[in-house]
Every structure is written in structure tokens, then in C-alpha cells.
Amino acid sequence: MSGKKEFREGDKESVKVTELRRLKQKRKIMEEFIQEFRKTARGSGYEGRPLVEEFKKEINTTIC
């Protein structure tokens, strides 16, 4: 039964990673995006530099 639990945990982590990679700032203000990003990142297994790199990919890079 332990194997099933590990699989489910890994599956949840995969779903979180997919959600994280689909997340985009678009028209959200930075504070809103940060909150959404943090919520989505929980349980993704991403930490440290990989998490920062994922964040940088998803923010708007142009300043109006």
C-alpha cells in the first residue's frame, strides 16, 4: 500500500508542476501574481533556484 501512496504523492506533484508552468502574470499586478505563484508552487517540489527560475519565466518582462 505504501507504493500507491508514493505514486499519488508523485502524481499530485506532477499536477502542481504543470499548473506552475501554465501560470502567467498577464494583466495581474505583481502582488496578485506572487500570491498565486506561491499558492501554486506549494506541493510542486520546486525549491530554491529552480523555483526562482520558474517565477522569472512567468512574469511580464516589459515595464510600461
Image (cartoon, helix red, strand yellow):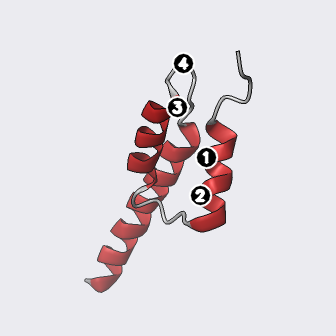
The quadrant of the image that shows the N terminus is bottom left
The disc at residue 55 is 1
Residue at x-position 55% and y-position 37%? 22
Q: Give the mark toward the camera: 3 or 4.
A: 3
Q: CA distance from mark 4 to mark 1?
A: 16 Å
Image marks 2 and 1: residues in contact by CB distance under 8 Å: yes
Residue 52's image quarter?
A: bottom right
Q: Which of the two labelled residues, at mark 4 and mark 2, occupies the earlier sequence position?
A: 4
SS for dot 1: helix
> What amino acid does circle 1 point to?
Phe
Position of the C terminus, as image quadrant, is: top right
Identify the amino acid type marked 4. Arg
Q: Which residue is mark 3?
A: 30
Q: For residue 10, which quarter of the picture?
A: bottom left
Q: Position of residue 62 (x, y in %)?
A: 74, 23
Count residues near mark 3 (Cα–Cα under 10 Å), then give few for <14, some for 14-19, many for 20+.
few
Q: Nearer the viewer, residue 3 or 28?
A: 28
